[in-house]
Amino acid sequence: MGTSISLELDCLYNGEEFNKLTKPLTFWKVMNDKECHFGFQYKDGLNIDTHQFNGTDKYGLYFVDLEYLPKYMFKGQIIRRVAIPDDANVYALDECFKADKIILCEKFDIKNFPYWHLNDFCLNAVKKNGLLLSYVINKTDEQIKEAVKQNGNALLFVKKSKQNYELCKTAITTTGNAIRFSKFVNDDLLNIAVNNNPFILPQLEKKEQTEKVCESACRKNRYLIEYIKSNKMRRRIENKLGNQHL
């Protein structure tokens, strides 16, 4: 639990005690479009779990605080603010909480979540999931750098005017596929890309498939030879690799 509150992990609290100890934190739940999770249909207002509550089993109605919310944003497109009734039972886990009762309050589409305007929230979000950069309203250099470090494909959401060589190299080193979104493409970056992910070879243009790039990819997976677009180069790579078992 990434907060400064004085809750002990793997402990059970009543709702009133939990609310006092966690003030002024806010709590949230990521939902799918139908707001139905594991057979439980959520509704506006009070929701009561249909299973007997036990902190040590899998049952319970789960929620997170704002710090860990970004880690779960891939699970759905709806975000709900959660309130805890005073008579609820709440169990504190490492990165989340679960309770036998929760109240579902305001509903937000993920792209309209109001915290996308807040720098600290956005920085924390992209550190946990770089692809969340797509929702950030005013992208800072620091947010962009952290996003591509976490997932190179976040480069897709960076305007070419904001890309520099080192940023692109970081993204491609993290995720070879990011070469597709890079403002800069040269032999060095192409070699990094195929060493990271040889299966991008078929996506490269013929002029990008240099002999070094092709050989590097095919040494990692021989079957990629058939995706070399130059017939002459394909034969040279085949001859060079011979009957090696790669």
Image (spheres, grey):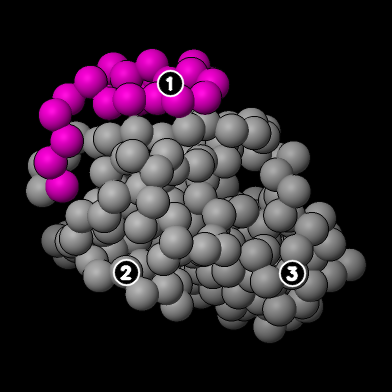
Q: Secondary structure at mark 3?
A: helix
- For label 2, the residue is 7
Residue occupying the far bottom of the picture? 166
- Give the extent of the magenta segment: 32-55
Coordinates of residue 211 in the picture (x, y in percent): 51, 68
Marks 1/3: CA–CA distance: 31 Å
Q: Is residue 135 above or below residue 245?
A: above
Q: Splitting the image into 4 quarters, where does residue 140 fall?
A: bottom right
Left or right side of 164 for 226? left
Other residues around mark 1 within 10 Å, as few (<14) / some (14–19) / many (≥20): some
Amino acid identity at mark 3? Asn
Along the viewing direction, whichever of 118 and 173 lies nearer the viewer: 118
Q: Splitting the image into 4 quarters, where does residue 39 fall?
A: top left
Coordinates of residue 41 in the picture (x, y in percent): 38, 16
Q: Is residue 120 visible?
A: yes
Along the viewing direction, whichever of 65 and 45 lies nearer the viewer: 45
Along the viewing direction, whichever of 242 and 222 lies nearer the viewer: 222
Q: Is residue 32 above or below residue 27?
A: above
Other residues around mark 2 within 10 Å, as few (<14) / some (14–19) / many (≥20): some
- For label 3, the residue is 119
Q: Secondary structure at mark 2?
A: loop
Task: Report the residue at 20% width, 55% height from top.
Answer: 12
Amino acid identity at mark 1? Tyr
- For label 1, the residue is 42
Quadrant of the drawing holding the N terminus: bottom left
Q: Is residue 49 above or below residue 143?
A: above
Quadrant of the drawing holding the C terminus: bottom left
